[in-house]
Image (cartoon, grey):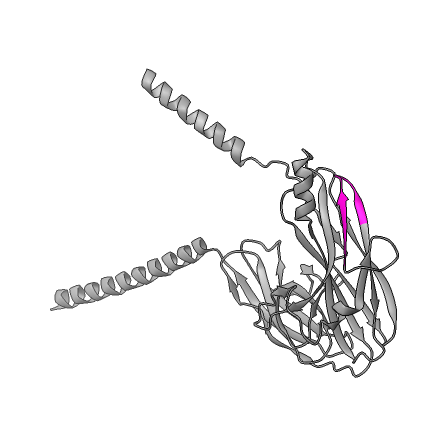
Amino acid sequence: MAKSKKIFSGLIGVVMVLVSVLLPYKQASAFTVSPQDQEYVLAPGQSVTGEVEATNPKDAEGDFYYIAEVVPYSVSDDGKYTTNFEATDDHTDIVNWVTMSDEDESEEKEVHGVLKPGETEKAYYTITVPKDARGGGQYFAVRVKTDVDAAQKAENNDMVVIKEVIGIASLVYVEVSGDIVVKGEVTDNNIPSFFLTPPINASFVVKNYGNTHAKISYFLQVFPLFSDEEVYTTEEKMDTKYVLPGASRVITQSWNNTPSIGIFKVRQTVYYDSMDNEPSVTEKMVIVCPVWILFVIFFLIAALIIWIVMRVKARGKNKKSEKKSEE
């Protein structure tokens, strides 16, 4: 009995340790840079000044020493749309047209600063488009990252600093006026017909053949199977994504509050570059059914088949018995 109590007490202790580890805990807020993206239409010879705001949250572990710098922005053309802040091409010439400052004057390619917990600072950039610039899309990013050298010096002076190497970027999309080619298509507008678990997901692929970025607008609608009354829609607050020239991008959207079981009519609508264009629309009947229900259905069907076979065999035996009795 005493041994059982010790074992039980030990188990209780283990459970309490696990609970203390697994219970939700308050995490520090993330360092942020805003806005996420900005868009301009500029003529050759025109200039514009924009800004990026960096914030070190109030509950940060320490001061954040940072560098804000101008870097090229491109993406891979393998369907994964992987961001690249190193590679250059015909659409990243703009990095040579941009200067930065922590004031309203543009002088350098990067600015340095330090943010204490709860502080926000702005970094300014100025784009000056050359007079002989060709028409089309040009792209860069203002990347805010950890100033490793400054952070190391501060740490050596017994200052509390954020040690992680952080790199966050604000993307800037610029269309230079001139010979603009807008050409692209929406392909593989796809809604799977069956889901074992929620949520319902829909996806599509966008291919941009033009020389400037395309802004894709899209929304999802969900209806009961035999009704046109929406149970879910994003039509009033359409999502948007950019697709760079020469790239393809897979975009997915979900109904996060999908019930665990049900049959629905799902419609996905996608506009390429403009709401004036004819949208790509696909609609399907979608079934959401957990695995255990499939097993139950399979069991019931199997049981029904076995019952029918047994009934047929029983009737056959009865007929044979009747014939023998008649003889």
Q: Quadrant of residue 127?
A: bottom right
In this figure, what is the number of numbered marks? 0
Q: Is residue 61 visible?
A: no
Q: Quadrant of the N terminus?
A: top left
Identify which residue is drawn at 49% across, 28% down: 16
Whether residue 114 is situated above or below residue 208 in the rendered picture: above
Q: Is residue 134 magenta?
A: no
Nearer to the camera, 117 or 272: 117
Q: Position of residue 251 (x, y in %)?
A: 62, 67
Nearer to the camera, 176 or 297: 176
Identify which residue is drawn at 65% across, 63% down: 222
Q: Main secondary structure of the magenta part?
A: strand
Nearer to the camera, 299 or 283: 283
Nearer to the camera, 321 or 225: 225
Horizontal relation, residue 10 to residue 218: left or right: left
Horizontal relation, residue 173 to residue 231: left or right: right
Q: Is residue 113 magenta?
A: yes
Q: Quadrant of residue 111?
A: bottom right
Task: Magenta stretch: give its range.
Answer: 110-121
Q: Position of residue 11 (x, y in %)?
A: 41, 27
Whether residue 45 is situated above or below residue 230 in the rendered picture: below
